[in-house]
Image (spheres, rainbow, N blue to C red):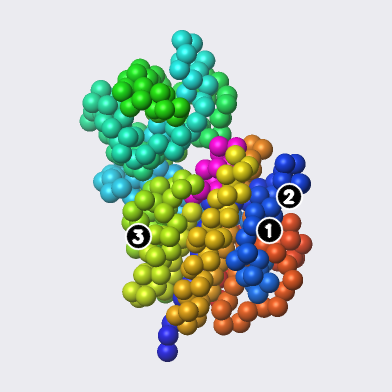
Amino acid sequence: MKRKKYVVVLGDGMADEPIESLLGKTPLEFAKTPVLDRLSALSEIGMVHTIPEGMKPGSDTANLSVLGYDPKKYYSGRSPLEALSIGVPMKDTDVALRCNIVTVSDGDEPFEEKVIIDHSSGEISTEDCSVLLEAVKKELENETYQFYAGTSYRHCLIWDHGSVIELTQPHDVLGQVIGQYLPADAKLLAMMKRSYEILADHPINIERKKQGFHPANCCWFWGAGTKPALSSFAEKNGLKGMMVSAVDLLKGIAVGAGMGVAYVEGANGGLHTNYEGKVQAALEALRDGYDFVYIHVEAPDEMGHQGSVEKKVQAIEYLDQRVIGPLTKALEEEGTDYRLLVMPDHPTPIRVRTHTAESVPYLLYDSASPKKESWHYNEKEAAKSGNYVALGHTMIAKLLA
């Protein structure tokens, strides 16, 4: 007898608020999503609260929740999870920090008066950003501070015998003067200032500006935390799990939980990621003995941070047409008995261009027992359904039931 398969398709930051230019609809309501429309008429929909009370809304805490890990118990910081994904050897006395290479204004104003323009430096390529990080490493790396390259603009700093200090997420202060959000720690602040001096006139950034792209001109430290200790996903759930994501954070959660990690060429966390490659990786994992796959798509979140209504709608349509469509078609053609959960981890409303802690809509489909409903998958109808999961980390039990 074939084992049942379980699939999560996570549209990062997909939930939003009604937008005037979309005729008062959310991007999820407005987007053309024929596959989700078909599935929602056969599924349970509802709302789930992924961010525990008192915790910051982020992809770290929210995705831990979706995977069944109570963030209040398991969360030790975002950066340590990312460090796991790129093989950073953390000691118990280390503190990991995210090192974004961001775009700040490049006028003659003092560093504290600069404005943060883009937290992703125009979705810079991993290749270009790794060169920029090497330039920073040559001057700033020592026995206490070690830099490690990640994906695109997302890198890691390990601070030997460091402190878990309060640091601001760059995507929370887009368009704002950075002075009040800079680190209180004098050494981290000095490193950020020096990184700007190193990167502002780097040949890669001179060329990026010529081509009309944002320069990647400043290191921004945030997300401090200590070495994580997640329990085994397989032991918790009796399932062999695979993570399919371009994002180091999600890969790190998977490594910490003892899950497999698929590496998909061309998967970059942006709008034009390799959607088809992610589907293929998920299907191959299910054929190769994995019981559970988690397909994470970062694009809706990135477009929310950019404040682009049009591109966020497009990201959701790509998720529908290039991920959920071919995935479910292949599973059905192969006669696979499966349960599918589609949801965001948190909202990333265009209005604020950052994460919020409101509940998000979920869709739960079972190929063996489809329902007969008349609703569509979006925030409004999911809220009207009356189905509500108050503790996000219990959602996986609903999927696996």
**Residue 369 falls left or right of residue 157:** right
- Residue under the point 46% across and 10% down: 108
Q: Quadrant of the C terminus?
A: bottom right
Give the magenta-colored segment's residue range.
Answer: 298-307
Q: Amino acid at mark 1?
A: Asn
Q: Do the residues bearing badges 1 and 2 touch, measured as CB atoms within 8 Å?
A: yes
Can residue 78 be seen in this snapshot?
Answer: yes
Secondary structure character of the magenta stretch overall: helix
Dot 1: what SS?
loop
Of all residues, the one furthest to the front in this rendering is 211
For disc 1, the marked residue is 378
Q: How far across and how far down the image is residue 323, in percent?
A: 50, 62
Q: Which badge, 1 or 2, comes first in the chain's sequence? A: 2
- Between marks 3 and 1, how big is the CA–CA gap? 29 Å
Dot 2: what SS?
loop
- Residue under the point 76% across and 46% down: 23
The residue carrying pointer 2 sits among few (fewer than 14), some (14 to 19) or many (20 or more) residues within 10 Å by Cα, namely: some
Q: Amino acid at mark 2?
A: Lys
Q: Which badge, 3 or 2, comes first in the chain's sequence? A: 2
Q: Which badge, 3 or 1, comes first in the chain's sequence? A: 3
- Residue under the point 53% across and 74% down: 339
Using the image, tell me which numbered label, if any, was put on residue 232. Answer: none
Q: Nearer the viewer, residue 298 or 110?
A: 298
Looking at the rendered image, the disc whose residue lies closer to the viewer, 3 or 2, is 2
For disc 2, the marked residue is 25
